[in-house]
Amino acid sequence: MRSRSIPIFAVLAAAVCAVQLSQAAVVFRPGQKTKIRAPGEEEVSGSALELFQMAQSAENSGDLKRAIKAYRSLVRKHPKDALAPGAAYQFAVLQEKTGDNYRAAAAYRVVVDNYPKSPHFNEAIEAQFRIGETFLNGRKIRLLGIPVKSTLDRAVEIFAAIVRSAPYGPYTARAQFYIGRATEKQGNADAAVAAYQSVVEKYPNESVAADAQYQIGYIWFTEARHGTKDAKAVERAKNGFSDFLFRYPKSEKAAQARENLRLLSQKATSDAFSIAKFYDKQKNYRAAVIYYNDVIRQQPGSEVGSRAKRRVEQLRAKVGDAALQSAALTAATAKTSGKKTTASTTTRSTRVGPASGAPPMRTSPGDVAPLPPPEADESLPPPASMMPDTTTAPEPSPSPDGSLE
């Protein structure tokens, strides 16, 4: 009995498939594989006017699926017809109504790119911006409960399309700013700073430019505060906030920018002292003194400045000034001593400074900065833990399968 039931089920399955195939549309095109379209997905044919009337009738009756199909067929088959721009826009509107925002954004992009003289051009830009905001504030896209793509990638894609299509439009500066916000949320500091910098440079008179300049400083401020591997984060943050105060001194964020600068100065001093101690423990006294002097220059009257000054004096007494000179200073001194041998020249050679323009050596009791600043001695990198990390801008997401293609 069991063996006979198998052919019966096979026959039933074949019958069901036959019914489905009879209802589906079979599409054959020369040189292409045969395609089977499910009911409701088959092409709609007719003149541009017939398709437009069919779409409007379906839309008015609430059959959005059929309306979408008719508008799409009109644009595909009659892209240069006078009705095509309106059909393309209405197609995008209905896609958004049905909740397919990503394809709707792509459809609005078709209106902007293919029909720039359309009366719906500005509306299509505004709609893209609106959809981009939903992706900017959204969550990761999931497939079977597994996150497969960040909505931030799609936000960047949509905002970039606005900047590209309407570089001087009313939404462009904000779209560029939101590219920065999206990449900042993704943790890509370099890409975010570049996006914000574009706002400041290209749209300096827009209100969002002040926010962009502040964010440049804030990104590096956050990096420095969280112990980033980028050794220049503190300086970059200080430059960002200083530029902000110079450009927008009356901004409501000016007070916070000044406070951040104060905290950054403390951070820079603390970091310099930590690096000095690191080299001190490694018995690399020349490097240690460079960073101790950095602390003294930054906060000469502070407690940490006094500690750094005492340690420099101890190291001088321990190893002597010659052992603490930088490589550039030692070479310059040796070169000068080899060329001039008079007693007076020999005396002067003990005080010559490096050719790079760094402060010359002095022998007075109050001298606490005989060495060039750290940035003038490239032979002394910071410890490995302070070396900059590398980041790359995210690759642009591929455009979706064109809703109108």
Image: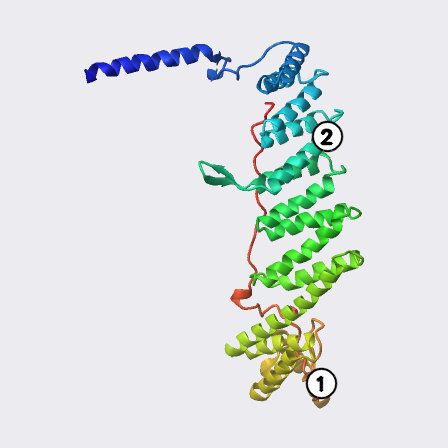
Q: Nearer the viewer, residue 32 or 52?
A: 52
Residue 354 placement (x, y as % from top left): 68, 75
> Can you say which quadrant of the picture contains the N terminus?
top left
Q: Secondary structure at mark 1?
A: helix
- Report the Cα–Cα distance between label 2 and label 1: 76 Å
Residue 142 placement (x, y as % from top left): 49, 38
Q: Residue at x 62, y 38 (%)?
A: 134
Q: Point out the residue furthest to the left here.
A: 1
Label 2 CA crowd tier, 10 Å (few <14, some 14–19, many 20+): some
Q: Is residue 65 above or below residue 126?
A: above
First in sequence: mark 2 vs mark 1: 2
**Residue beneath disc 2:** 123
Q: Is residue 63 above or below residue 327?
A: above
Q: Secondary structure at mark 2?
A: helix
**Residue beneath disc 1:** 348
Q: Nearer the viewer, residue 166 or 357?
A: 166
Q: Residue at x 61, y 59 (%)?
A: 222
Residue kind at label 2, given as amino acid type: Glu
Task: Identify the mark at residue 242; answer none if there is no mark.
Answer: none
